[in-house]
Amino acid sequence: MDIKYMRAALAQARKAYKLGEVPIGCVIVYEDKIIGRGYNRRNTDKTPLAHAEITAIKKAGKFMKDWRLEGCKLYVTLEPCQMCAGAIVQARIPEVIMAAENPKAGCAGSVMDILNNPDFNHQVLVKKGILQDECSQMLKNFFVELRIRNKAEKEQKGGSIE
C-alpha cells in the first residue's frame, strides 16, 4: 500500500514540476482513501506557506471536519521542512512515509527531528525510502534543468547589454 500512495504523491510532485516549482508532492490517507492532496506552489502562489504538506493537511482537515488528523498517514516525496514537520505534529498525524531525505532542510531526522522530539506532546512514526530513487531522480532532474535555464537567462541578459 505504501508504494501505491507514494505513487499518488509522486503524481502530485509532477504537477509542481510542470509549473516550474520544486517537484514535491503529498497525499494524506485515511481508512485507505486519499483525503488530502498537495504539491509545491510557493512561486506560483507567491507565499512560503504553499508547501505540498500544508495544502494536503488543509484539505484533509476539511474532509475530516477537524484539525486533528488522527488515524491518517501522510505520504511525501521529500522529507518535511521545519514548518511542515511542525504542522504534522500540530495536526496529530501519527505516521509519515517519505521518499527522499533532505540533508539541507529535513526535519524528520536529517537536520533535526521535529517529528520525534520527546518534548512535544505528539511524536510521529516515520518510514523512509519508499520510491526514494524515483523521487530523488525527479528532484535532481529539476535542479539540473533549473541551472541550465538560469544560466541561459543570465547569458541572454548579459549578451543584450552593449
Image: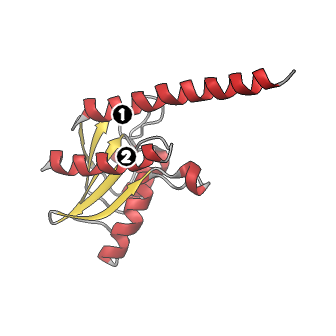
Residue 162 at x, y percent in the picture: 87, 20
Reading the image, the residue beneath label 2 is: 13
Q: Earlier in the sequence, mark 2 or mark 1?
A: 2
- Element on which disc 1 rests: helix
**Numbered circles on residues, count:** 2
Q: In this view of the protein, which residue sits in the foreground, 46 or 103? A: 46
Q: CA distance from mark 2 to mark 1?
A: 9 Å
Residue 132 at x, y percent in the picture: 26, 33
At x 40%, y 27%, the residue is: 140
Badge 1: how crowded within 10 Å, few (<14), some, or many (20+)?
some
The quadrant holding residue 33 is bottom left
Q: Is residue 118 visible?
A: no
At x 79%, y 25%, the residue is: 160
Is residue 122 shown above or below 24?
below
Reading the image, the residue beneath label 1 is: 138
Residue 95 at x, y percent in the picture: 24, 52
| Left or right placement of residue 35 versus residue 142 in this view | left
The quadrant holding residue 150 is top right
- Confirm or deny contact between disc 2 and disc 1 (CB under 8 A): yes
Point out which mark residue 100 bears: none
At x 30%, y 56%, the residue is: 27
Q: In this view of the protein, which residue sits in the foreground, 139 or 99? A: 139
- Element on which disc 2 rests: helix
The quadrant holding residue 108 is top left
Question: Residue type at mark 1?
Answer: Met
Q: Is residue 36 visible?
A: yes
